[in-house]
Amino acid sequence: MTGASPYRLVGARPEPEFEVRVDGRPVPVVPGQTVGAALHAAGVRTWRTTRFGGRRRGLFCGIGVCFDCLVTVNGVENLRACLTEARPGDEVTTS
């Protein structure tokens, strides 16, 4: 079965990429990506600092166990970026 698209084999129908806004700047997203994955793919490795000591934080565990990747999405605070699926039109703010 040479030349067959792998998407045909699994019945997938990939959707086009879209953007979310992170602190006012556009970040490209592949459908199904989390906010954390989109930030990481865009080269953003840290987006907040700790209250004490000002240490930089971003993705750490990537599976929702820790709280290093907290963001605000559409006004909802303290969401873990690694678990929050990005949606078209999302407004993400970091701290």
Image: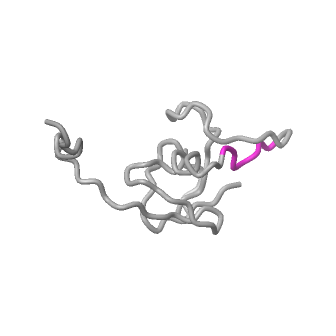
Residue 33 relative to residue 48: left or right:
left
Most extreme residue toward the left is: 1
Q: Is residue 35 magenta?
A: no
Could you say where residue 56 lies in the image, as x and y percent from the top left? 76, 41
* In the image, residue 95 above or below residue 25: above
Magenta stretch: give its range.
45-51
* In the image, residue 63 above or below residue 84: above
Counting every numbered tag in the picture gives 0
User: Which residue occupies 17% across, 37% down?
Assistant: 2
Residue 19 relative to residue 9: left or right:
right
Asked where in the image residue 91 lies, by quadrant, the reply is bottom right
Could you say where residue 65 lies in the image, as x and y percent from the top left? 54, 31
Most extreme residue toward the front is: 2
User: Which residue occupies 69% across, 49% down?
Assistant: 47
Residue 76 relative to residue 4: left or right:
right
Could you say where residue 14 lies in the image, as x and y percent from the top left? 29, 54
Could you say where residue 26 lies in the image, as x and y percent from the top left? 57, 66
